[in-house]
Amino acid sequence: MQLAFNMRYWLAAVVAAVLSLTVGTVLAHEGREVGDYNIDIGWINEPAYEGVMNGVEIKVIKVVESGDDHHGESSATTDHHHGESTATDDHHGDPGAVKGLENTLQVEVTYVPTGASRVVNLSVDVDEPGRYTAPMLPTTPGVYEFRVFGAIEGMQVDETFASEGGGGDFDDIQPLASLQFPEDLPSTREMESAVRGAISTAEEARDAAEEGPGVLLVLALALGLSGAVLGVVGLVVGLRRR
C-alpha cells in the first residue's frame, strides 16, 4: 500500500513537470557559425529533466547578404559572449532557413559520464523551415553532448556541442527530484532497481525450491512480491503512455 501511495505521488510529479515544460520557452540553446551557416542547438524543452519526454532541436540558418553590406550578414546572429542564438522571430519568412537537411544531417547524442551514445535522425518541422527535431526521453541526469555531422547544402560539417556541465550552453539534464517538495519520490531508476531485485529474489527462491519441497512457501512469497512490484510498474507505464 505504501508503495502504491508513493507511486501515485510520483506520477503526479511527472505530470506536473510535463505541463510546466510544455508552456515554457526555449532559453538555453547554443548558437555557432559554421562556414556560411548558423547552427543553433539544444533540447526541445528547457529546463530539461530526466524521465520526461524531450528531444534534440536544431535550427540551421544560412548567412544572407544585406543590401547595405556586401560582405554579408547572418539572418540569425550569435551572441558569442553568452553563446545563445538571437535568431529572428519570423521563422516562416526567414530567407536563410535551410531546408532538406533531414536527409543529409544527423546528430549523435552522448551521455558524457558513461560515454553511451546514439545517432538520431532528424525530422523536419513543416511549420518552421530550418528547424529539425529528434524526439528522445533522457533517462539519466548529467552532462550530454550533441555531435552534428553530415552535410549542409554540400558543405561537410562535424561539430560537437556540450551542455552546461561540459562547458557549453544548452541545459544539462536535471534530476526530477529537483521539482519535488517536501520529500523526494522514487525515480525511474529506483523503480527499475526494485524490479530487478524482485526478479532476482524470485529466481533464487525457484532454485532453492528445486532442492527440496520445504522452501515452496518461500518461493510463493517471492513470486507474489515480484508480481506486485511488476504490477505497479506496469500500471505506471500504462498511465504514462495514455
Image: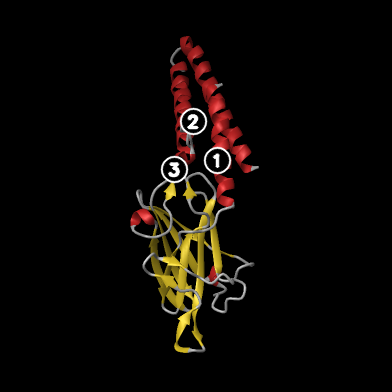
Cα separation, mark 3 vs mark 1, equals 11 Å
| Mark in the foreground, 1 or 2 | 1
> Label 1: which residue?
14
- Secondary structure under tag 3 reads loop
Q: Nearer the viewer, residue 161 or 106?
A: 161
Residue 232 position (above or below residue 222): below
Q: Earlier in the sequence, mark 3 or mark 2?
A: 3
Residue named by callout 3: 175
Residue 74 placement (x, y as % from top left): 47, 78
* Residue sitting nearer the eye, 33 or 20: 20
For badge 1, the amino acid type reads: Val
Task: Mark 3 vs mark 2: give the one in front.
Answer: 3
Question: Label 1, label 2: how many angstroms apart (C-alpha)?
Answer: 20 Å
Q: Residue at x 46, y 70 (%)?
A: 39
Q: Which quadrant of the rendered structure holds the N terminus?
A: top right
Pointer 1: residues within 10 angstroms few (<14), some, or many (20+)? many
Q: Residues within 10 Å of mark 3 (few under 14, many from 20)?
A: some
Amino acid at the residue labelled 2: Val
Badges 3 and 1: C-beta atoms under 8 Å apart? no
Is 23 above or below relative to 74?
above
